[in-house]
Amino acid sequence: MNRLVKPSIISQENVLVLLVPAILYYSLVHLFGMFWCILILSAYGCFVSIYSTRKSIVAFFFALFGLIEWMVSLHVPVTLIETFPQFSLMASALQIGLIMLVFSFLRFPLPMLLAEATYDHLKALNRQFPDEYLRMWQKISAMWITSFAAKAALFYFTLSAPAEQVHWMGILLGWPLYCMLILVSIIFVNAKVLSFYRESLTSEGNRTHINGHFF
């Protein structure tokens, strides 16, 4: 269980899979715009897929995120974003929640894919407890989707709020929210994995008891 609670953060895999796509996304958007950001991240995803197909999901996720944001920006009037700065924050939360919802319906919850891309030992749990494992990640994904939906709703109901309040809301509902969701997800995964093993040991003990009784 310590491997779940205290994973190795600084590693070649984590840098390639998580850190590089995140830095590329925010850097390329500001330097070259969303269009080139999408192209470069897609190319990076193809490159990483040579190294590991599953690990390339993060790069493609950022590229998909950028593609949706770019399409939204093309169809939303600039005056609307200037008048209501929280509109872009609301749209961003909605698009993340929508992407996660689609992946959940496809039985590939994004939190599961991102976790497995970083920590290979989680795949063993998938092989050992396939149904329980998927349900666990679907619940975690539902928690993330609900959080982003609530975030979008909060920005929607504060469209008339002053710019300073919107600024602080954007900060508080940014990385602090992500960190809280990650922490709660880790705690939940640890608790569920422990219950998996306890149930497995209990069922094995019952079978041993039955075998001993009849034979």
Image (spheres, grey):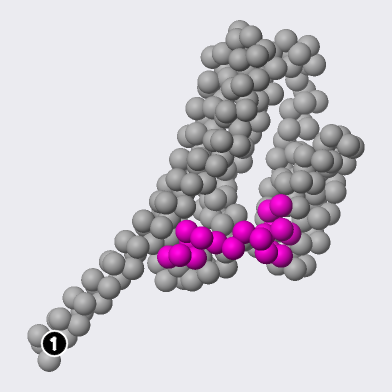
Q: Residue at x 81, y 55 (%)?
A: 44
Q: Residue at x 27, y 73 (%)?
A: 201
Residue 101 appears anywhere in the view: no
* Residue under numbered circle 1: 212
Q: Residue at x 71, y 52 (%)?
A: 19
Q: Is residue 213 left or right of residue 70?
A: left
The stretch in magenta equals: 1-19
Q: Taken as a whole, is the magenta stretch helix, strand or loop?
A: helix
- Quadrant of image for the C terminus: bottom left
> Does 9 appear in magenta?
yes
Q: Is residue 162 left or right of residue 28?
A: left
Coordinates of residue 40 in the picture (x, y in percent): 85, 49
Q: Is residue 206 left or right of residue 73?
A: left
Q: Is residue 205 left or right of residue 39?
A: left
Residue found farthest to the left: 213
Residue found farthest to the bottom: 215
Q: What kind of element bears circle 1?
A: helix
Q: Residue at x 66, y 30 (%)?
A: 92
Coordinates of residue 79 in the picture (x, y in percent): 78, 11
Task: Please rate how many residues cluster around mark 1, counting C-alpha atoms within 10 Å: few if below 14, some from 14 to 19, many from 20.
Answer: few
Which amino acid type is shown beneath numbered disc 1? Gly
Residue 75 appears anywhere in the view: yes
Q: How many marks?
A: 1
> Does 200 appear in magenta?
no
Q: Quick check: 102 above or below 90?
A: below
- Quadrant of image for the N terminus: bottom left
Coordinates of residue 146 in the picture (x, y in percent): 48, 34
